[in-house]
Amino acid sequence: MIIKKFVGKTEEEALGLAKAELGENVVVMNVRNAKRKGLFKFLKKQQIEVTVALEDENERYAVAAAKQETDMKEAFRQVAQIANVAAETKRTERRAEDKPAEEKTPVSENLTVKASAEEKKGTSVSVEKKLQEADELREKEAVVLEESEGEDGQMIKFMKLLYNTMLDNEVNEKYANQIIHEMQKNTKPHMPFDHALANVYQKMILKFGKAAPIEPAQQNPKVVFFIGPTGVGKTTTIAKIASKFSVEEKKKVALLTADTYRIAAAEQLRTYANILEVPFRVIYSVDEMETALRDFMNFDYILVDTAGHSHQNVTQKENMNSFIHSLDGKVEKEVHLVLSATTKYRDLLSIADTYTDMTSYKIIFTKLDETTTLGNLLNLKLYTGASMSYVTCGQNVPDDIEVFNPQKTVKNLLGGK
């Protein structure tokens, strides 16, 4: 980690000096007025001191890799520990149930008869010793038989544990069965639980695929439409993304809204635009959308809020469709379907089908802080095949948003915390 201070007439000048020396990846840690020095310091103009930090690439990747490995091991440990405890408890119960029966086995009776005969012949062999040896032999045989027949059984119990954990997290039964079936095909004899869990963990991550956040266009601007039903938090999500781009990445951002049905939604986005000091415009027609594109052609991002409405409203669906496709072939664009993690699975499928007929899209899930189960993230990903882009977990702008993390989500679905 490199930490340095730079002084300039303005914050922009000081930050420019920092980037010129350390590169574009510097992180601003502090900004303050620089101390004036010298005999006539009171005559000198006030300058700005900016403290920046730069993380070494190798250090950053090493930390990220180490954290991922630690998270994986912790997830494996939690689930494997549960499975091992369950298996050991079952084994103890079985031994306790079998023990009384062993004392009455024909082998014990035969040894008793044989011992009596030997006693009559005057031998010094102890009957108790023979019985003890027989019991020990039978116990060893029982353990060997249990281990030879029980390894598959224990793995089945482990798979059932994973299956029930996924169902508890509201993973759809169809997809949970697919995952367990794939696990069975790849499970080898004598495979430890943690290896089997690692296999499932990696395969579920692959099912989610790589996150697909908003990236810059090859040529300015990138137009991003946000669609979805009412009440899922589209406007707040747009504000969070706009803040990330404008404040943290210093990109030129314009905010548009085609939601002319709810005045409050337009005013909310206008308020965010004023705070961020970025342009804002209400769009009423396709012609105004094309005009806005010409006006903001030199911007990095144009973020467009659309009307939140029932996915069963045909008229509003057609209006939105015309807005989205009005820019086809004119500019690089993408569409993000914003959904709430608290919505029922059947409703999510209906919503997804409605918008799939309209356009291709990426998925943003909101309100993760309002639910304890994340199974619908996997369900909708597998149902639609769409890429996951962002998740939000609160109302704070811009903090409560992050790029979708498949490792973190899978760990949760498998019972990790």
Image (spheres, rainbow, N blue to C red):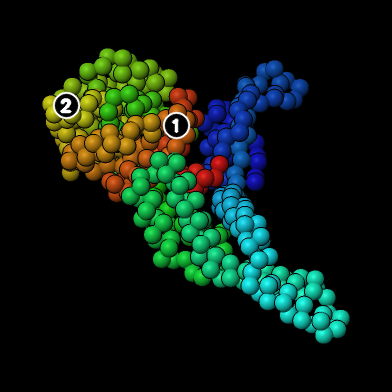
Q: Residue at x 48, y 59 (%)?
A: 156
Q: Is residue 264 above or below residue 76?
A: above
Residue type pointed to by label 1: Thr
Crowding at mark 2 (Cα within 10 Å: few <14, some 14-19, many 20+): few
Image quarter (top left, top right, bottom left or bottom right) of the C terminus: top right
Q: Which residue is mark 2?
A: 313
Residue type pointed to by label 2: Asn
Give the quadrant of residue 17.
top right
Q: Residue at x 59, y 55 (%)?
A: 90
Give the mark, 2 or 1, whose residue is nearer the N terminus: 2
Q: Residue 228, how many percent across, how many down? A: 28, 31
Q: Is residue 288 above or below residue 145?
A: above
Indicate the secondary structure of the residue bearing disc 2. Answer: loop
- Residue 66 visible in the snapshot: no
Q: Is residue 389 above or below residue 110?
A: above
Q: Residue 123, how many percent across, how many down? A: 85, 83
Q: Residue 198, how many percent across, how many down? A: 51, 58
Question: Relative to 131, is 2 on the left or the right?
Answer: left
What numbered label is drawn on residue 371?
A: 1
Q: Tell which of 159 and 186 is nearer to you.
A: 159
